[in-house]
Image (spheres, rainbow, N blue to C red):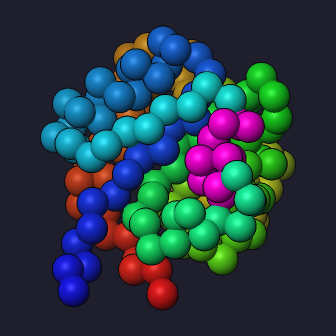
Amino acid sequence: MNNARPVTIIMVEDDEGHARLIEKNIRRAGVANEIVSFTNGTDALSFLLGSDGTGLVNKGRQLLVLLDLNLPDMTGIDILEKVKGNEHTKRSPVVVLTTTDDQREIQRCYDLGANVYITKPVDYDGFANAIKQLGLFFSVMQIPEAE
């Protein structure tokens, strides 16, 4: 069996400008993986956990979630909790991308299982640079095989 299944990047980001910037910089770093974008938590969760909420829909799939915390319909923390609490998606790495640099919120994300927490710098160059680093990180990252 081939273990090197391609990782699908799930981007949950309601700001279209940020979403485009993230995608551009991931591509620029040489990462060609499929990127599936969502602008709200409801659609993202129904993709991640399926319409029945069991997560079976993604059993064995390699997913990486890029998660904005400030979404129009729910907080990214709600999504993080559900993804990390589900047996089929809990091993999927979650990268939190947000404008919040509140230490308690950062700690809460790590406590819930976030793998990386990136504060979006207000200036575009800083943000682009953070995403570029992230793209390089994706290109070398191996995601553990789901059982």
- Residue 43 drawn in magenta: yes
In the image, what residue occupies the spot 74% across and 59% down? Answer: 52
Q: Is residue 70 visible?
A: yes
Please, is residue 98 above or below residue 16 in the view?
Answer: below
- Residue 79 drawn in magenta: no
Horizontally, is 63 left or right of 44 in the view? left
Please, is residue 95 above or below residue 119 in the view?
Answer: below
> Magenta residues?
41-50
Tell me the chief SS of the magenta region: helix
Q: Quadrant of the N terminus?
A: bottom left
Q: Position of residue 137 (x, y in %)?
A: 31, 53
Q: Position of residue 21 (x, y in %)?
A: 39, 20
Q: Is residue 113 visible?
A: no
In this orientation, which residue lies closer to the viewer: 21 or 3? 3
Residue most extreme to the left: 30
In this orientation, which residue lies closer to the viewer: 89 or 99? 89
In the image, what residue occupies the spot 45% across and 58% down? Answer: 63
Q: Position of residue 37 (x, y in %)?
A: 49, 32
